[in-house]
Amino acid sequence: MGPSSSTPSRSAILEALCHDPLPVGGVAVALLLGTYGLFGLPVDLPLLVAGFCGTALAYLVDRAWMPAPEDRINRPGRVAWVQSHAGWLAAETVVLVALGGAMVPYLQWATLAWTGALGGIAGVHVLLRSREGASLLGIPKPAAIAGAWAAGGALLPLVEAGRPIGGEALLFSGYRGLFILPNLLIADWADRAGDAAVGLAPWASGRTGRQVRRLATASLLGAALGAAGWAVVASQPVLVGIDAVGLLLMMGVVWGLDPTRPRTALLADLVVGWPLIPALTAWMIV
């Protein structure tokens, strides 16, 4: 007998993974856990839950409740999925708001201030994206978003733990940003046609795929230099080496996959979640 009609098919599950914001929240958790493992910090569950909920909610609002007109050209499959799962996404919104809000009393004020600043970047992106030629405070969108992801994943655990944000932490955050940036570069380049069609002026419209891949490669090479420098001052350089394997995986995504396919975006997001592996390794060797 075949599978029950009530059992989701593989294609339906894959669609959900590609379009539902929850996996993006999981990537945020992986980055946070990577910082805990690499810096030898005890895991803070409220921050993990808040990070998951806040990230997923930001992407949910962007994709479902404030959809951009260019998405109908750039991501028609996602638009159709969002429309057909409006009830599910509404329930997700309620749960994420309630669960994330319940974590707020357990977080340090400094963490909340940092989170508010990072959330402001997301808000500016949503508010300005419909304006012709708009960018985030004059910074190209991918760099600004990569910086926000890096600061959130790399620095929030340190802030919550009361650790000073010194040179090692800033070097680590920069390394993380250069690791994440290629994912955003190729995703933004893949969206250039729809952006231009609705009157936006995407930075990638005048660049070829090879040029964007070279830019992404330069970012990864910069990250490799950052990893080498960080390994010198890190307490466990072996874990830094394991973490840096993610750079090779991202290089494979940049040069080996079609950025216009939703599955490529999902695989790239999973590579961004690679820091979970060195985190698990750190806990195994303790």
Image: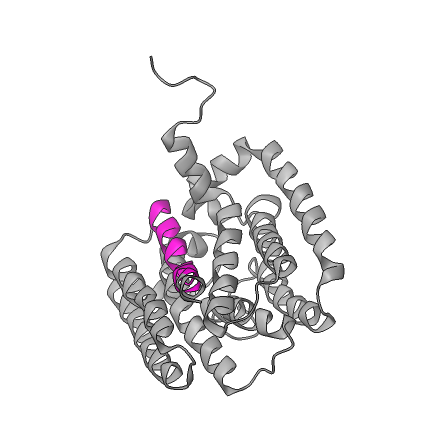
Name the outermost residue toward the front.
Answer: 286
User: Can residue 261 be seen in this snapshot?
Assistant: no
Main SS of residues in magenta: helix
Name the outermost residue toward the right.
Answer: 105
Measured from the top left, where is residue 237 in percent x and y?
A: 36, 78
Above or below, 171 relative to 140? below
- Please report the bounds of the magenta region as a residue range: 261-280
The scheme the figure's colours follow is one colour
**Residue occupying the point 55% across, 33% down:** 85
**Residue occupying the point 42% across, 31% down:** 12
Q: Is residue 237 left or right of residue 211?
A: right
Measured from the top left, where is residue 110 in percent x and y?
A: 70, 73
The number of callouts visible is 0
User: Can residue 171 be seen in this snapshot?
Assistant: yes
**Residue occupying the point 60% across, 38% down:** 89
Q: Quadrant of residue 181?
A: bottom left
Q: Is residue 281 magenta?
A: no
Above or below, 98 relative to 205? above
Above or below, 141 relative to 25? below
Q: Is residue 267 magenta?
A: yes
Q: The N terminus lies in which quarter of the figure?
A: top left
**Residue occupying the point 39% across, 63% down:** 281
Measured from the top left, where is residue 221 in percent x and y?
A: 30, 76
Foreground residue, 265 or 286? 286
Foreground residue, 149 or 78? 149
Measured from the top left, where is residue 135 in percent x and y?
A: 53, 68
Q: The C terminus lies in which quarter of the figure?
A: bottom left
Foreground residue, 92 or 158? 158
